[in-house]
Amino acid sequence: MSQQPRDVPPPRPVGGTPVEGEVVGADSGLGAAARALADAVAGLLGRDEPGRDTRARDGSGPGRSAAGARAASGVLSDVVSAVAAAARDARAGSGRERATATGTDPRGGSAPSGLLSDLLDAAAPRLPIRDGARLRRAHPGASDAEIADALVARAARLTGGVGAATGGLAAAQWFAPPTLVAVPLELGAQTVLVAAVEVVLVGELHELAGRPAPGDARARAGAYLASWSTQRAVGSSSSGGLFAALSTAGTAALRRRVTRRLARSTTSVAPLLVGATLAARGNRKATAALADRLRADLGLPPAGPGA
């Protein structure tokens, strides 16, 4: 019996070609953290395979809501460790003075938005974004609108799962106050993990619409990261330009977007399991809203009923 094509991208950049050299900061904690983040995203997407139930395509099958949270729990600790390592490396390289200026404690666990945006920028070329042909092979017989619905449903399910997993960890820590020092790192990990999943969604919607960003893997990744930062399609009037992510203005836009995401992540630390519910719901809504804006920009049909 032939097996249904898996909706799982391999952990390699757009087009399947290697990134020239290593990611930015490859010899540093940032480079290692970027590789860990890209691997974590590939792991999340790989664990979120459609099941035999046909309703799994739109995320409504039995247990599909919990699947994202289970997958997220499996990789969140890896990303927390990666963010912590990158933060330690940044503090070691810049000294206690810079750590004090950014409001971080050289001994404690927190991750400023500048570090998180640098981490996203370094990881972007390694995110597993599929081109249009591979997306259609993974969804045989589906229209582009149906494929877009499936991509958005998967991303929203996973970002919601990341929020739920972070909220669950934070809820457990309410019973052990000394461990609350770790919460800022967990919020940083949630922020970059959610953002990276959304950057994959941004890239795949562009590819599906037949409007891939030009250039090599690094240039395309930068364009999709800029698109995520501005919440508009590549090349649209308010997207900040194709290579905005490489400019000073693009870097500032990326940091502002990461800062807003980080602020939204604080709902995860609400008492008990309320934080998990709020974070999951907020992440799902934000991912769906991003997708709606991009679909309009790219000329893709709007979300179908119940999508």
Image (cartoon, rainbow, N blue to C red):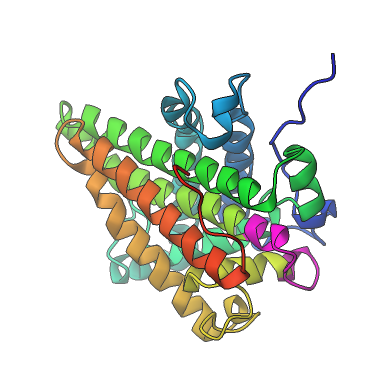
Residue visible at 33% across and 52% down? 110
The answer to whether residue 17 is left or right of residue 65 is: right
x and y percentages locating residue 300 in the rendered image: 61, 62
Residue 216 is covered by the magenta coloring: yes
Specify whether residue 295 is in view.
Answer: yes
State which quadrant residue 96 falls in: bottom left
Q: Residue furthest top?
A: 1
Using the image, determine if residue 105 lies above or below residue 178: below
Using the image, determine if residue 27 lies above or below residue 80: below
x and y percentages locating residue 212 in the rendered image: 73, 67
Residue visible at 45% across and 34% down? 77
x and y percentages locating residue 88 in the rendered image: 45, 52
Residue 271 is covered by the magenta coloring: no
x and y percentages locating residue 23 in the rendered image: 70, 59
The answer to whether residue 253 is left or right of residue 178 is: right
Residue visible at 82% across and 51% down? 133
Q: Nearer the viewer, residue 194 or 104?
A: 194
Total numbered labels placed on residues in the image: 0
Using the image, determine if residue 96 lies above or below residue 11: below
Q: Nearer the viewer, residue 87 or 153?
A: 153
The quarter of the picture where the N terminus appears is top right
Q: Residue furthest front?
A: 305
Residue visible at 55% across and 28% down? 56
Specify whether residue 81 is in view.
Answer: no
Using the image, determine if residue 31 lies above or below residue 158: below
Q: Nearer the viewer, residue 196 or 205?
A: 205
Q: Which residues are magenta?
A: 203-219
Q: Nearer the viewer, residue 92 or 51?
A: 51
